[in-house]
Amino acid sequence: MTSPLVPVREGWWSAFDYLVDGAEAAVPDWVRETALAHAADDSDRAAIAASAYKGGALHVAEAAVQPLADNGDTLAACNLALVLYKSGRTEEAETLYRLAHSRGQLDATFSLANLLEETGRTEEAETLYRHAHDKGNPDATNNLAVLLHQTGRTEEAETLYRHAHNRGNPDATNNLAILLHQTGRTKEAETLYRHAHNRGDLVATNNLAVLLGQVGHTDEAETLYRQAHDRGQPYAGYNLAKLLDETGRTEEAQALRRQAADTTPE
């Protein structure tokens, strides 16, 4: 599955979660509020809104993007919906996404489908994912495949994963590998995990290590678990500890588990 606000093309912010840049987070709210009060035009307001979102100042982001949405900018409406959703105002966000979707904004269609799926309305989410997929949105293709995979429709899911993978969607690469792994096609799964791992996908790194451990390549599995764990992949430490236990290194395994417990949020 693929849901900070960073520009991924002109006027549109990403709806996916990335690490907040330290410089953005360090900017006091009053600086952005002052900048917004003196914004020269809508491009300034959009830039302030994006910066505010990345820094966690959602009230400033909302104030900055609201006038743009009120003036009929559908991209701004989508971005405002995202701010509202992140603020916990799901109903308001849904209303805005539906408005932008009705005006043909494909990103709104995808985001609305995401929201609906996350709130348990999977039938309507599937319809909207299919609409966005048919219009060429590879993220929608991947998410539709995930939904189908979860509901047992694996053949269609595989077809869609392959389609999105071939269009360069990194999540689809890992998800296709998972499906192949689950259905016993480990050689192709390994190839795809390696492809995603080489592109920096830590989930794929962990999954590749799991597969290698299952087929007896424990040395490489351990190396990959350590790499993923050192870079913050949450499951790799647990899996590494399990492997260490199985190979008689219980003290290090226990130390890893204690470390995990110490860093788990309350």
Image (tube, rainbow, N blue to C red):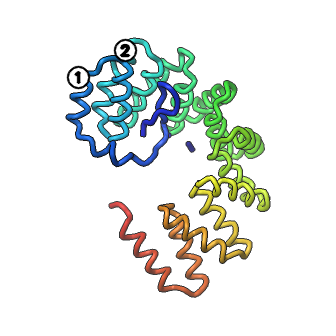
Q: How far across and down, in percent of the image, does residue 85 sit?
A: 40, 34
Q: Residue furthest front?
A: 40
Residue at 64% across, 67% down: 209
Where residue 31 sits, quadrant-wise, is: top left
Q: Quadrant of the N terminus?
A: top right
187 is higher (above) or lower (below) than 226: above
Q: Is residue 243 left or right of residue 7?
A: right
The residue that mark 1 highlights is 37
- Say the numbered circle drawn on residue 70: 2
Q: How far across and down, in percent of the image, does residue 109 sit?
A: 56, 26
Q: Identify residue type, mark 2.
A: Asp
- Say the numbered circle drawn on residue 192: none
Q: Identify residue type, mark 1.
A: Ala
Q: Quadrant of the C terminus?
A: bottom left
84 is higher (above) or lower (below) than 100: below
Q: CA distance from mark 1 to mark 2?
A: 18 Å
